[in-house]
Amino acid sequence: MSNVDSGHPANVARLFMVSAALEFGAGLALVVAPAAIVRLLFGAAVNVFPAVGIVRLTGVALLSLSAACWWARADDSSTASGAIVWAMLIYNVGVLALVLLGGLGALGLVQWTAVVIHAAMGSWCGRVAARPMPLGRIDQRLER
C-alpha cells in the first residue's frame, strides 16, 4: 500500500500542504478579483455588484482553511488535525455536490475543473479520514 492510499503521517502532511496551496490560490483570487471570478463562474449576464461582497467573504474563508491546513501540516495525529481532515472532506464533497447539481451555473470548463479538483481532494481526504485517528476523544468528551 502506498503512502497516498494509506493514512501514513507523511500523507497527512502532503494533504495539508496541497490543500493549503489550493485554498490559498482560490481564496486570494476571490478576494483580489471577485468580479472576474463571478463572471467566470456564472457568465456575463449576472449582476456582479451584489455578489462581490459575498465572493470576497468566501475568499477570506478559503484563506482561513488554507492557514489551518498549512499550520497543521506537521501535526499528523492529533484530534485537531483529524478534525481538519474531516472538515476538508465535508468542504470538498459539498463543493462537488454544488457544482454537479448546478449550484455554480452551467457546467463549463471552469466548473468541470472544479469537479476534478474537488473529487480528487475529497477522495484523498476520505482515504486519510478512514485511517484510525484520535477523533474518538471528541466522541468520549461528548458522551460525558
Image (cartoon, grey):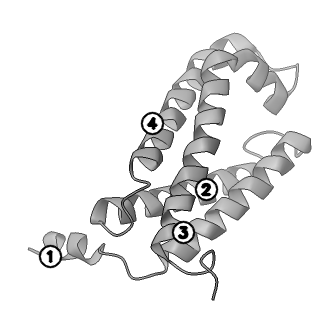
Distance of mark 2 from mark 1, alpha carbons? 29 Å
Distance of mark 4 from mark 2, alpha carbons? 15 Å
Which is more N-terminal, label 2 or label 4? 4
Q: Nearer the viewer, residue 72 or 104?
A: 72
The residue located at (49%, 80%) in the rendering is: 130
The residue located at (59%, 77%) in the rendering is: 3
Q: Is 141 located above or below residue 62 in the figure?
A: below
Q: Position of residue 84 (x, y in %)?
A: 41, 57
Q: Position of residue 114 (x, y in %)?
A: 76, 48
State if disc 1 and disc 3 touch (CB < 8 Å). Answer: no
Q: Quadrant of the C terminus?
A: bottom left
- Find residue 92 and name its label: 2
Q: Secondary structure at mark 2?
A: helix
Q: Secondary structure at mark 4?
A: helix
The residue located at (55%, 51%) in the rendering is: 17
- Tell me the residue that label 4 is attached to: 64
Q: Amino acid at mark 2?
A: Asn
Distance of mark 3 from mark 2, alpha carbons? 17 Å
Which is more N-terminal, label 1 or label 4? 4
Q: Amino acid at mark 4?
A: Ser
